Amino acid sequence: MVRRGRKPGWQRRIARERINILFRLAEKTLAKHPERSRRYVELARKIGLRYNVRLPKRLKRRFCKRCNTLLVPGRTCEVRVKEKILMVRCLNCSKIYRYPLSKKKK
């Protein structure tokens, strides 16, 4: 039985596959077509919202939430480490993301 407001499992599985495909395409086209790459990230986010699919952490940290630019260190973002904090700055819109650095869990 499907709960109210929730899509069936097969639709969510397909949505996850499409999100992964769109992120791969965004990586490939970033150098030649940055606007197209940005559009792929935007579409992936929309699919995630529509089908209630949470993006994995590895994908969530790969794009700017403000301008949908794929974040590649040295090309589209600047990465700094300050006192147990990883700072990522988008070179397109200058948004800064701060992620805490913690010890690795055993």
Image (spheres, rainbow, N blue to C red):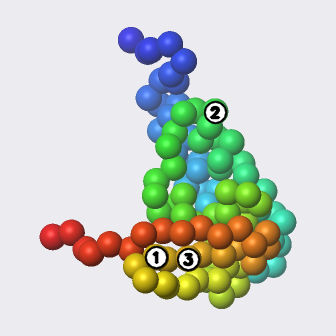
Q: Residue at x 46, y 76 (%)?
A: 85
Q: CA distance from mark 1 to mark 3?
A: 6 Å
The residue identified by callout 3 is: 87
Image mark count: 3
Against 41, is 82 above or below?
below
Residue 37 is situated, as x and y percent measured from the top left of the image, at 75, 65
User: Which amino acid type corresponds to the residue marked 1 in the rendered image?
Assistant: Ile
**Tag 2: residue type?**
Arg
> Which residue is at the front of the view, 74 or 47?
74
C-alpha distance separating marks 2 and 3: 30 Å
Q: Residues within 10 Å of mark 3 (few under 14, many from 20)?
A: some
Task: Name the residue rendered at 50%, 22% in the picture.
Answer: 6
- Measure how far apart labels 2 and 1 are at the Cα level: 33 Å
Q: Secondary structure at mark 2?
A: helix
Q: Which residue is mark 1?
A: 85
How many other residues sit within 10 Å of disc 2, few (<14), some (14-19) or many (≥20)? few
Indicate the position of residue 104 as horizontal and vertical percent values.
Answer: 25, 74
Q: Which residue is mark 2?
A: 50
Q: Where residue 59 appears, x then y in whole percent?
A: 53, 60
- Left or right, residue 95 beside residue 55: right
Amino acid type of the residue that numbered disc 3 sits on in the rendered structure: Met
In the rendered view, would you say 15 is above or below 30? above
Question: Of marks 2 and 3, which one's residue comes earlier in the chain?
Answer: 2
Crowd rating for badge 1 (residues with CA inside 10 Å; few <14, some 14–19, many 20+): some
The residue that appears at 54% across and 18% down in the rendered structure is: 5
Q: Residue at x 21, y 69 (%)?
A: 105
Q: Quadrant of the N terminus?
A: top left
Q: Position of residue 35 (x, y in %)?
A: 84, 66
Question: Is 61 on the left-hand or right-hand side of 64?
Answer: left
- Asked if disc 1 and disc 3 are in contact, CB closer than 8 Å, the reply is yes
